[in-house]
Image (cartoon, grey):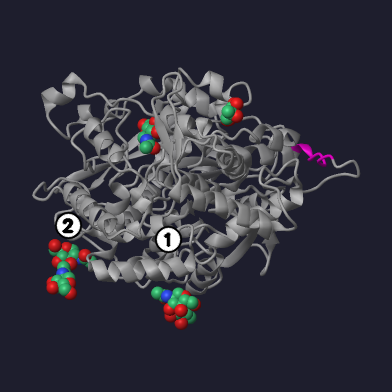
Amino acid sequence: MEKRAKDFGSEELFAPKFDRRSWRGNVGVVVGLLTLLLLLLTPSPLSDVKISFFRTSRAQNTEAGIKSKDAFSWSQITPSKELEYTPCFEDFLCARLDVPLNWNASDRDGGPRAAIAIVKVPARVPVTDPRYSGSVLMNPGGPGESGVHQVLSAGKHVQVILDSPISPEEPSEGKYFDIIGFDPRGVNNTTPRLRCFPDAFNQQYWLLKFPDYSFLWDYESVLGMEWARAEAMGASCQREGDENDMARYANTAQTANDMLEFVERHGEWREMMASVIMAKDAVPTAEQKAIVERTAWKKGQEKIQYWGISYGTLLGQTFTAMHPDRILRLVIDGVVDPDDHYSGTWLTQLQDSDSIVTKFCEYCFEAGPEKCPLWTGKSGRDVEARLEKIMDDLKLNPIAVATVGHYGPEVVTWGDMLLHLLTGMFFPYSSSEFFFTMLAELEVGNGTRVGSMKQSFLRAAEIPAECIRDGPFSDACVTSHYISGMGSFQDISCMDIAGRNNITKRDFHEYTMVLRNQSKWLYTSWARNKLACLGYTIAPAWTFEGPIAGNTSHPLLIIGNTHDTVTPLRNARRVSTLFPGSAVLHQDSQGHCSYSNPSLCTGKTVREYFQTGKLPEAGKICSTEWLPFIGCVNKDANGDCVELSLNDQILWDAMVGVTEVWP
Ligand SMILES: *[C@@H]1O[C@H](CO)[C@@H](O)[C@H](O)[C@H]1NC(C)=O
Ligand SMILES: *[C@@H]1O[C@H](CO)[C@@H](O)[C@H](O)[C@H]1NC(C)=O
Ligand SMILES: *[C@@H]1O[C@H](CO)[C@@H](O)[C@H](O)[C@H]1NC(C)=O
Ligand SMILES: *[C@@H]1O[C@H](CO)[C@@H](O)[C@H](O)[C@H]1NC(C)=O
Ligand SMILES: *[C@@H]1O[C@H](CO)[C@@H](O)[C@H](O)[C@H]1NC(C)=O
Ligand SMILES: *[C@@H]1O[C@H](CO)[C@@H](O)[C@H](O)[C@H]1NC(C)=O
């Protein structure tokens, strides 16, 4: 999502302490299913301090990518059954892969079509080079997050992580990959579009009318309101009667088949590219033969390389269960339990969440009064008590903020701070410390900064004249203010569970109470996911009947954090039993998926898996180089951070790059 820091009014509040480049990309009001669907734009004032020892270069590629975005439009590309890449976004390649709208249709090839939006960071060697090792597909989760966005903003960093550290100019056995992002069905640039709102203004109206009472489950009227909102939303997304609408065709099984189609078409593309290159370069005959053999399309046998996070792990598992013989490399990171997901039970996610806050408070206490804005008492427990007290006070006494500059009157509420807390819990590296700083300000009644931040991302969503001319839901109505993910996460999940989540208000209340026992911080927002399927009456066109399990052509690498916000380590362990030969890599950190707190050890393990296929030894635990408040973990006798070797530094910079732009 584009950076949307307000151009006026913010300087006096945020400068010079805030580096504008550190503003994160997404505005948040809704907590999504597996990731925060729309994140708070959280400036992290401390991030320059904490990473200065690692000489981080912030996503320059991203900045460039964003600047050039206006120049390219997906409608310039005609969808094609073969992969045809067109230059886009300055130095990326884009394609629109033409696939059946419904993989389960009897007239698959004659029926309606969909076009999957694909973006690629091309490999650093040509396909004729023996070190060219194919395409790696990514999925950022959600469900409903844009893989195009993910790879535009982080794909080059991902390539550094997976590629051989040896420069392609030097001879080596190293491997080099294309990095591929795609928008799954129902998401962003893939068509037909899933749309729940006629235009961006309607969407904004809906969001602004959604203040944080959505967090206050104690009041029955609020539950009634949330219930009705979910019904209205679901009924709007399904667009009944519109045969070509995406809603019935956007579930995980269909997208898994799109991935298989990509994998096959990639083989075709590779063979074609090799012959094009050989036709124009003078390649000796003996070498030609080897190239032809190596690059030949192995029709019906091409294999996938994939890295999926969060919901992307469910997509990866579903693909694997459907096509266990098509696995070359498959990493799932931040694991969803497939049976819990497909049954619509949704009870295996918050087991480790609250420990994250406890750990933050321990690190904060350990770091001492200089570095810990809420340092107090004798232990992490005392810090946590202080944090809880500030939060509790906000419930009864929201903080009034008078107008400042271009910002109007505002109120800072418990719900606002809960959203900031959740952002910190999901993304410790980028957001945990700043949350404590904000709380310290609120503790003394100063809501100026937090209140202004709340408004600083607002932009009036305009309706272009073309949208009025072409009518509601038309392409012209999808402006940069139209948030494409709104609706897709509900739709994909609801089509996955195919009506298995038929609840009453009473059931829902009980469900909420069970979740409350798992996590006092997350249960209020998480419970809402269960409501999302209200209002849907349509059935998915196709579902995969399971089981999610399989004997794979290459073992999976499965990653889990000690305390993950919504995908506990225990899920990784259980899923490993479903796919014999797979290995679990345990990263000793807090946050959602491994990238939320980078670890060189994890980066090297993932790289080795892609380079050689080798799995980590059983029981391997990776620690991280950085902890909240404490900063770098490895210090010398003077207390300075130990310098990294050049190769480690390059890997670290890439991992931080991913952390800061994802999701
Ligand atoms: C959708 O894709 C465009 C690129 O075509 C990207 O700029 C934008 O951020 C994506 N939207 C979301 C919500 O990720
Ligand atoms: C409130 O906090 C801001 C920093 O966020 C600071 O600039 C301002 O001086 C504080 N106001 C008061 C009255 O202390
Ligand atoms: C949902 O449950 C109610 C009551 O248990 C039942 O009457 C209704 O038919 C169910 N609906 C579906 C779609 O299964
Ligand atoms: C929540 O936990 C308490 C204490 O362990 C237990 O008594 C209660 O039955 C639990 N409630 C639910 C809804 O699971
Ligand atoms: C495939 O489509 C047919 C006809 O619409 C439907 O009866 C069947 O249930 C579908 N199969 C699956 C696995 O969803
Ligand atoms: C995997 O192979 C084992 C041993 O041959 C077999 O018992 C098991 O059922 C297979 N699992 C699946 C999901 O096919």
- Compared to residue 282, the image places residue 516 above or below, namely below
Disc 1 crowd rating (10 Å Cα; few below 14, some 14-19, many 20+) is many
Q: Is residue 258 left or right of residue 194?
A: right
Residue drawn at point x = 58 percent, y = 48 percent? 595
Relative image position of residue 39 (x, y in whole percent): 44, 41
Q: Type of residue at label 1?
A: Tyr
Q: Is residue 645 magenta?
A: yes
Q: Which residue is mark 2?
A: 105
Q: Point out the frontmost of discs 2 and 1.
A: 1
Q: Which residue is mark 1?
A: 523
Among the 4 quarters of the image, the one containing residue 378: bottom right
Judging from the image, what secondary structure is the residue with disc 1 in? helix
Say whether disc 2 or disc 1 marks the residue closer to the N-terminus. 2
Towards the viewer: 384 or 563? 384
Rendered image: mark on residue 658 = none
Among the 4 quarters of the image, the one containing residue 446: top right
Labels 2 & 1 near each other (Cβ < 8 A): no
> Disc 1, ligand 4: is the CB inside 8 Å?
no
Relative image position of residue 333 (x, y in whole percent): 53, 56
Judging from the image, what secondary structure is the residue with disc 2 in? loop
Residue drawn at point x = 15 percent, y = 59 percent? 537
Residue drawn at point x = 29 percent, y = 48 percent? 488
Query: Which span is picked out in magenta?
Result: 640-646
> Disc 2, ligand 5: is the CB inside 8 Å?
yes
Residue drawn at point x = 53 percent, y = 53 percent? 592
